[in-house]
Amino acid sequence: MENLARSIANKISKKLGYDDEKTAVIAYGLIGLFQFIIILCACALIGLVFGFFWEAMIIFWGAGLLRRVMGGAHSSGFYSCLFISVVCICILAYICSLIKVYSDSFYFLLAYLVIYAAAFVIVYKLAPVESPNKPIKESKRVRLRKKALMTLGIFAILTVAQWIINNLCDFKFYISCALTVSVMWQTFLLLPAGKAFVSAADRIFNAGKHTK
Amino acid sequence: MKTKLLAVVSVIATLFATLAATSACFWWLYQPEEPSSLQDR
């Protein structure tokens, strides 16, 4: 897929007369676009078939938005990223779809508050976690940390608001469970344990690829 | 027509690359090497 992005970028640059740097920027953008579209379509399709479409979409957008400002553990290649992302989103969304009907209980609110409190501490201490392929300058680091804490705050407000609305009104909707799971997942990826998990999943994916 | 289409693709890809450049990383787990012209954003 990366080669396809580079070949499309080369074709565009040849036709429109762009230089090498502009070609690299287009290829970089196309790789990101392909990654985004493939993960979104795969999760939406699997979610529609197995009945957890909305949970999968909340986790996809929630964790994706958090990741933009927090960074986190990275996989070694394009395909292992697709594999780990789609599998994890679908498993987490399935679990959310099973437990969401119980999420109006007080114990869930308590769990949400504990998870958000832990996430605020971890994000304040560790975010943003950079990748060797994309170093982050100190000024940008401070800006991203602020944005990460703000995003986390908005997610926390939405989670508590949904819990209150569901307990006060007859109208029921469930976003808090999936939103909190996306915060949990993204915060986990900031920790050394998250890095170890992604490395292990990477190894499993690469081993499976080599045995074919 | 083909040139117009390629120009549209190039604009969308550049927009996406710029969005990625202003963040900590790409959307999910894979981060390709960032072009040098985007690194100071």
Image: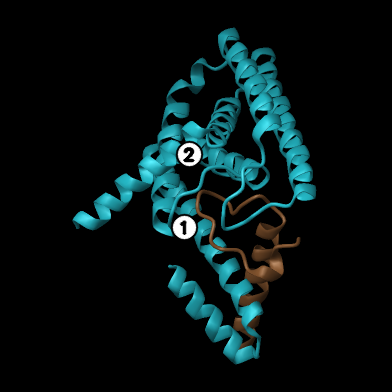
Chain colours: A cyan, B brown
Report whether B40 appears left or right of B2.
Answer: right
Q: Is residue A31 above or below residue A68?
A: below
Identified at 64% across, 89% down, the residue is A16
Disc assigned to residue A206: none
| Nearer to me, A3 or A121 | A121
Residue A116 place in picture, x, y as percent: 65, 23
Residue B9 place in picture, x, y as percent: 61, 75
Does the rendering let one see residue A26?
A: yes
Measured in 3D between alpha carbons, the distance from the residue under mark 2 to the one under mark 1, in whole angstroms, is 23 Å
Pointer 1 local density, CA inside 10 Å: few below 14, some 14–19, many at least 20 = few
Identified at 60% across, 67% down, the residue is A29
Nearer to us: label 2 or label 1? 2
Write down the quadrant of residue A65 in the picture. Answer: top right
Report whether A166 appears left or right of A4.
Answer: right
Identified at 54% across, 43% down, the residue is A60
Q: Is residue B20 above or below residue A14?
A: above
Chain under callout 2? A
Q: Which kind of residue does numbered mark 2 sit on?
A: Lys
Q: Is residue A17 above or below residue A102?
A: below
Disc assigned to residue A195: 2
Q: Which residue is mark 1?
A: A38
Name the image quarter holding the C terminus of chain A: bottom left
| Nearer to me, A103 or A204 | A204
Name the image quarter holding the N terminus of chain A: bottom left
Q: Which kind of residue does numbered mark 1 sit on?
A: Ile
Q: Is residue A104 above or below residue A64?
A: above
Element at badge 1? Answer: helix
Element at badge 2? Answer: helix
Chain under callout 1? A
